[in-house]
Amino acid sequence: MESPALSIVSINNVQLGKDVNIVQPVNLYGCTIGNNCFIGPFVEIQKNVSIGNNCKIQSHTFICELITIGNNCFIGHGVMFINDLFQKGGPAGGNKELWKETHIGNHVSIGSNATILPVIICDHVIIGAGAVVTRNIEKPGIYVGNPAKFLRTINTSF
Ligand SMILES: CC(C)(COP(=O)(O)OP(=O)(O)OC[C@H]1O[C@@H](n2cnc3c(N)ncnc32)[C@H](O)[C@@H]1OP(=O)(O)O)[C@@H](O)C(=O)NCCC(=O)NCCS
């Protein structure tokens, strides 16, 4: 039997704030995680990702390069972020000029199994479970579906 090239999940070169709780195994490298955050198992967070304070990243979520997440955010289980839209008819591969950024504001909760394409999401937004967010969200509220559409307003006074 041939031997495969093996890499091991690890926590490598991560800037961690105070009181961060991580449940292994996780694959975190080159990213920044603020104070009082929780990172569940089977999460991957790639380099140059920035996560603010008081955030929960639930199990099985993938956060790729070029993503920023603000403070007081909840990222549910199995949320997938995307930075490569296959704009040239297929994966960009190593051509990072084709990758695009995503910025998540403060007090944003993303339901389980949502997919977030490269967008900007403002403060005080809830994304429903299984939603696919394809456009910027500029107004607080709840958004659901594929593509995600506005469902209703929420109380933003917290
Ligand atoms: C989006 C969400 C917050 C809406 O909650 P709500 O305001 O109580 O919504 P309702 O249950 O009253 O549903 C309102 C409408 O939206 C629809 N809807 C609710 N959630 C939806 C979702 N995730 N995707 C698509 N449609 C959804 C309902 O079917 C209903 O449609 P109808 O009016 O045509 O019947 C909630 O359903 C949700 O998805 N929460 C995510 C929870 C989560 O993932 N938690 C992770 C930790 S376990």
Image (cartoon, helix red, strand yellow):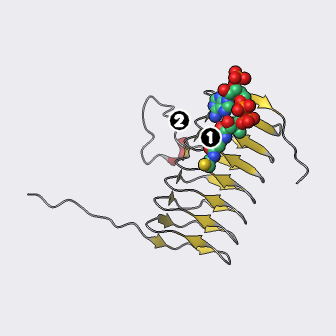
Viewer-proximal residue, 101 or 7? 7
Which quarter of the figure is the N terminus placed in?
A: bottom left
Residue closest to the eye, 83 or 111: 111
- What residue does disc 1 label? 118
The residue at the point 62 percent across, 67 percent down is: 32
Q: Which residue lies furthest to the left in this view?
A: 1
Measuring from the top left, give residue 68's x and y in whole percent: 67, 55
When the figure is inspected, residue 15 is found, relative to residue 57, above or below; the finding is: below
x and y percentages locating residue 111 in the rendered image: 63, 44
Q: Mark 2 or mark 1: which comes first in sequence?
A: 2
* Label 1 SS: loop
Image quarter of residue 135: top right
Residue 94 to residue 25: above or below:
above
Q: Residues within 10 Å of mark 2 (few under 14, many from 20)?
A: some
Task: Inspect this view and state whether residue 68 appears.
Answer: yes
Q: Establish if 6 lies above or below 80.
A: below
Residue visible at 76% across and 29% down in the picture: 151
Is residue 136 shown to the viewer in this render?
no
Q: Position of residue 143 (x, y in %)?
A: 72, 34
At a point 61% along the width and 38% down the height, the residue shown is 129
Q: Is residue 127 left or right of residue 141?
A: left
Q: Do the residues labelled 2 and 1 touch (CB within 8 Å)?
A: yes
The CA distance from mark 2 to mark 1 is: 8 Å
Q: Residue 85 carries which label?
A: 2
Please name the amino acid that badge 1 sits on.
Answer: Pro
Residue type beneath disc 2: Leu
Q: What is the x, y in percent for residue 71?
A: 75, 60
Report helix, strand or loop for mark 2. Answer: loop
Q: In which quarter of the image is residue 69?
A: bottom right
Q: How crowded is mark 1: few (under 14 residues within 10 Å), some or many (20 or more)?
A: many
**Left or right placement of residue 124 versus residue 37 in this view:** right
Residue located 62% across and 40% down the image: 118
